[in-house]
Image (cartoon, rainbow, N blue to C red):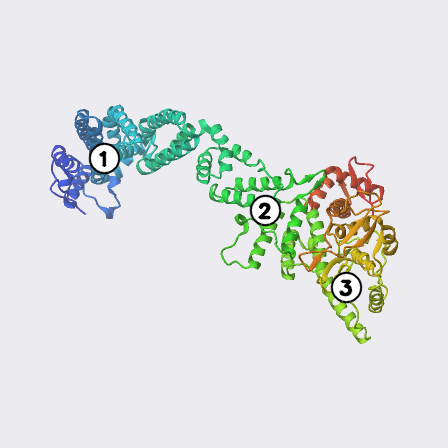
Amino acid sequence: MNLSNHSVGRSFSENWALLESGLDRILMAFQDGFNLSGSMDLYTTVYNHLTQTTQTGFSTINHSAGRSPYNTMRAHSSGLGSELYNSLQNYLRKRLETLKQEANAKAGEDLMAYYSREWLRYEKGARYIDHVFRYMNRYWVRRQREEGRNDIYDVYTLCLHLWNVHLITPLKPTLMNTVLDQMAAKRAGGSIHSEYIKELANSLVLVSIEEGQPGKTSHLVYHQAFETPFLDATRAYYQSEGEAFRSQHTIVEYLQQADTWINDEEQWCQLYLPQVTLAPLRKVCNTTLIETTVEILNREFLPLLRKEATEDLRRLYHLLARLKDGMVPLLNRWTTPPPSTPRAYTEALLRVHSNFQTLVANTFSNDSGFVVELDKACREFINRNSICKQGDSVRSPELLARFSDSLLRKAPAKAAVSTATTSGGAGTSDDNLLEQQLSGIMTVFKYIDDKDVFQKFYSKMLAKRLINRTSVSEDAEANMISKLKVACGHEYTHKLQRMFTDVGLSRELDTGFKDNLEAEGRNNCPDFSILVLSTASWPLQPPNTTFRVPDAVAPLYEQFQKYYDTKHNGRKLNWLFQHSRGELRARLNKPGVKAGANPPYLLQVSTYQMAILLLFNDRDTVTFEDLTHLTELEASTLINSLTNLVKSRLVIAHHSTPGGNALSVGGPGSWYEINLGFKNKKVRVNLNMPVKSEQRVEAEVTHKTVEEDRKWLIQAAIVRIMKARKQMEHVQLVNETIVQVQSRFKPSVASIKKNIDILIEREFLERSEEQKNTLNYLA
């Protein structure tokens, strides 16, 4: 194939004149139009020059003979390429010298505008020139670089390199001073042409050619010429402005201003500067605006927390989160337990948890560090606050169990969780509200360390609700037990579920007994119901006193005993009279008052109180000694039973010592009579109210029971572990025991060691003679 055109036979000077004219049109009059035909003419001129054998002739390229243009060039001198490359280089130098002289005559924004305009024109022209000399890039430049000529570049890179040498280097001080002046004006609120700065930065990036690797930028020129002075000026500006602002404004105002400064800088950088500058700019802002004031900002955290200043806390979080380990001091302050008061204990816990949980979500974006620290703070506050400890007894689980009891027990006015925690919308049903309240209980429950204490108190209160039939509903009770089962497992709630089973079986037994009485014609018996409960499942203790069943109900008591023996041969019934109750109809009329003038009262009493009151059917007065003899109650139990009767003024106490308190129960030597003038606003009067002293004693006994149960639980865990391992080091056994029982409570190492010694004494374990601090299991 023979290539020929109008450049065939022309000298180099003639060809270069043609190329120079085309380069002028590309670099200086490109906007007037430059068609594809003109570009191809220039490309062909370059091609013909590089492939000619002499300055007046052109070679014939025979592809069928297997000779490529590249091989043809390698067969001839490289002088043709050098001549063309040097001429192009000299042309560009002259052009850039002209631009430099014109730029030196300008200053300020005019200089930036001139530089931006000429750079855009030059860079675009460089791409077209590179296309014109593409053949030279592909063969001659490539061969020169393969031979080690690192000072030879492809044409586009050559254009950028010369722009750096002849324009950027001499103009750099003036350009950067102008940039820094404009940035200062912008930060002061002035208006600037940010596009000019953007084009300067882009030009510095493009001319940052990595040594020996043309086409790959290193950002070196940009870093040295632009980024370093820009960051230094930014640092100096915000050091000065930050100190001045803090001296004249509050920390809260500084938070707002620092947040604004940082956001403005980052947004401007993302729009107008290379992305490599964003990270160092952030570091400068963080150091000057945050790191230097981190102590002041940390001290402001708790005051803002107490004020619940959500927006300011959000700013504080976002500022400190920018620093490495910047959140650590804040997290340490976060762990300080919130102040607590005895008032509305459980509601306060729920309200505090809800407020702080909302704070973590809205202000700290559910940051994992704050979520963990919130859990730690709640656990610390709930288990070790100022009111949950009395002596050695942990009261927090007890108080939570009592709050649960108030929700699940029928009462005229049930306790309610604060509206901040569980309030529903308008028209929320009672069932939905109760569900929210129980969920709130479980929120606190998950933070309790001593879950076995909660279980013990909850089971006692559940037993009372079931015995007295005061549960809100069986569904609500089952719902709560289901929640506890999910939280702690089947073993935790097994006895609670068994209690419901016993109640159901007792109903069937009670119905069968009543049917049996009707069949025998005993229709004049008092209305009654009986619960038969399994000893292993119910947290009930046998009575600590003897008791004589009143004659009015003794036949019924004996009849049921016989009926039960026929149904369950071999079982023994232990009557829990201290948990029994009754209802008496009292007709009280003073002497001389017409019968029926006063309405009869329905007195709700305990079985012991019932036995006391029934004695007054046969006598007007009863001495303390007679009461003890006729009821066979212990003196302490008798006094407790008389307390509410005397305080309600249904029974009048007379004391052997003159001047005694009329509301004092008395004791040996006292005597009692019914107050026939008894008045009460209610017809149904509840006299079976718990006495505070009894509640305190019951709580103390429960805590002691918990300690005893813990001892057996620890020993059982130790035996299980050793039975599986046979031999184990003492320290490892202690650690595994803690792991096994920590879902119920957190045992101390001392208590585990004590129980290990007990098991050694009981010959479940022995100390190894060969290995010190090693235990063996004895089958």
Amino acid on which the number 2 mark rests in the picture: Glu
**68 or 149: which is nearer to us?**
149
Is residue 568 in view from this perspective?
Answer: no
Within 10 Å of the Cα at label 3, are there few (<14), some (14-19), or many (20+) other Cα atoms? some
Mark 1 and mark 3: Cα distance apart in space:
121 Å
Can residue 108 be seen in the rendering of this structure? yes
Q: Nearer the viewer, residue 141 or 327?
A: 327
Residue at (74% x, 68% y) in the render: 508
Q: Secondary structure at mark 2?
A: helix
SS category of the residue bearing label 3: loop
Query: As drawn, is 253 to the left or to the right of 661?
Result: left
Tell whether 345 sits left or right of 564.
Answer: left
**Label 1 with label 2: CB-CB less than 8 Å:** no
Residue 347 is labelled as: 2
> Sequence order check: which comes first, mark 2 or mark 3?
2
Counting from the top left corner in percent of width and height, residue 768 is at 81, 38
Rendering coords of residue 255 (x, y %): 42, 33
On the picture, is 760 further left or further right than 366? right
| Cα separation between marks 1 and 2 | 97 Å
Report which residue position mark 1 lands on. Answer: 76
Residue 502 position within the rendered picture, expressed as x and y whole percent measured from the top left? 74, 62
The quarter of the displayed image where residue 408 is located: bottom right
Q: Which mark is residue 530?
A: 3
> Which tag is nearer the camera, tag 1 or tag 2?
2
Mark 3: amino acid: Ile
